[in-house]
Image (cartoon, rainbow, N blue to C red):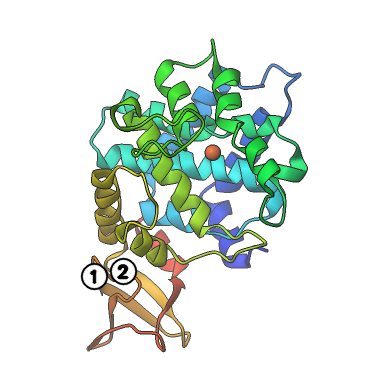
């Protein structure tokens, strides 16, 4: 369940309405809104504007919020759209390309709407057979986007689970056959999956997830993109106010590249590294709005 802190930040950033809109576009195949290019384009513009207007850490705080199972797809789609847009900005891509990456994030998992809900929202690990069904979703996404969206968006949807070593799915392609948008979407997808709470696993703190990326816990990703992602995330979190495990506040002063879970923080004149006993519990949300 979401706590009031997250509900508040989602209302203030309009994040709640955005993910409800996505639900409407995804789940009403008989209406004109169904994957409408115009409506998706407008949504994409709104997301792009938010990325410019808000501090990325504010957006990340919405992304990091615990979510209900049944709103998993729309929240995940919105989060991947935001993360794709943020990453595309860090890669200094031009504005039209940034929007394309956002759109790819919004649409990458739309094929899941064709998979039985009891599999998509299963509150447990999937069986092998269910996993085979689930692994068809990139193919369905590609099919649903045909004739409506361009090749880069479609190939990101089809290839966001491919791996550079050829061990991914659905096509088992490798290296140069996997485009930039698919590589970026793969990172956004994993980040969001790792920070989200599923009923069979608990969510992880963003700093912990950054640690896993740096340590190479997820095979087949583009290492250069991963390192750029971790570096930029560390910069964004530096100097941010955090809530410590004892309920006090501190400011992050340095995030070690190979040990992001234990940042060096400052409380008054006291500067020290966090550890297993005294650790960051989360961001201090109010502080995020001072410059947004
Ligand atoms: Fe996916």
Q: Position of residue 123 (x, y in %)?
A: 72, 56
The 10 Å Cα crowd at callout 1, few under 14, some 14 to 19, many 20 or more, is some
* Mark 1 Cβ inside 8 Å of ligand 1: no
Residue corresponding to mark 1: 256
- Asked if the residue at label 2 sits under 8 Å from ligand 1, the reply is no
SS at mark 1 in the image: loop
160 in relation to 3, above or below: above
The residue that label 2 is drawn on is 260
Spatial distance from mark 1 to mark 2, Cα to Cα? 5 Å
* Figure quarter occupied by ligand 1: top right
Please provide percent x and percent y for residue 171.
47, 28
Front residue of this view, candidates 50 and 117: 117
- Few, some or many residues within 10 Å of mark 2 (<14, 14–19, 20+): many
Q: Is residue 21 visible?
A: no
Q: Are marks 1 and 2 in contact (CB under 8 Å)?
A: yes
At 41% from the left and 89% from the top, the residue drawn is: 277
Closer to the camera, 276 or 271? 276
At mark 2, the secondary structure is loop
Which residue appears at 27% of the width and 66% of the height? 238
Q: Quadrant of residue 53?
A: top left
- Tell me: residue 38, above or below residue 7: above
Residue 132: image x %, image y %?
64, 38
Residue at screen point 33% across, 56% down: 216
Q: Nearer the viewer, residue 289 or 69?
A: 69
Vertical side of 130 occupied by 95: above or below: above
In the picture provided, is 240 more to the left or to the right than 5? left
Label drawn at residue 292 = none
Q: Residue at x 31, y 27 (%)?
A: 95
Residue 114 as seen in the image, left or right of residue 286: right
Q: What is the number of callouts on the image?
A: 2
Q: Is residue 270 above or below residue 160?
A: below
């Amino acid at each position: 369940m979401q706590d009031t802190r997250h509900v508040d930040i989602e209302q203030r950033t309009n994040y709640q309405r955005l993910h409800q809109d996505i639900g409407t576009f995804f789940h009403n195949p008989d209406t004109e809104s169904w994957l409408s290019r115009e409506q998706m384009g407008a949504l994409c513009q709104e997301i792009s504007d938010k990325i410019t207007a808000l501090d990325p850490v504010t957006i990340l705080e919405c992304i990091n919020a615990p979510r209900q199972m049944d709103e998993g797809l729309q929240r995940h789609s919105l989060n991947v759209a935001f993360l794709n847009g943020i990453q595309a900005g860090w890669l200094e891509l031009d504005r039209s390309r940034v929007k394309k990456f956002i759109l790819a994030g919004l649409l990458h998992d739309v094929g899941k709407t064709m998979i039985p809900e009891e599999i998509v929202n299963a509150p447990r690990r999937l069986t092998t057979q269910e996993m085979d069904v689930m692994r068809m979703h990139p193919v369905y996404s590609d099919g649903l986007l045909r004739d409506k969206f361009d090749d880069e968006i479609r190939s990101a949807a089809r290839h966001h689970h491919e791996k550079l070593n050829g061990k991914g799915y659905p096509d088992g392609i490798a290296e140069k056959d996997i485009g930039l948008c698919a590589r970026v979407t793969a990172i956004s997808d994993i980040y969001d999956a790792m920070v989200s709470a599923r009923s069979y696993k608990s969510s992880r703190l963003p700093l912990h997830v950054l640690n896993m990326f740096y340590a190479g816990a997820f095979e087949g990703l583009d290492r250069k993109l991963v390192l750029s992602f971790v570096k930029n995330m560390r910069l964004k979190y530096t100097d941010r106010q955090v809530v410590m495990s004892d309920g006090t506040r501190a400011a992050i002063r340095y995030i070690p590249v190979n040990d992001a879970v234990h940042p060096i923080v400052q409380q008054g004149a006291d500067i020290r590294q966090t550890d297993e006993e005294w650790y960051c519990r989360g961001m201090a949300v109010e502080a995020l709005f001072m410059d947004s």
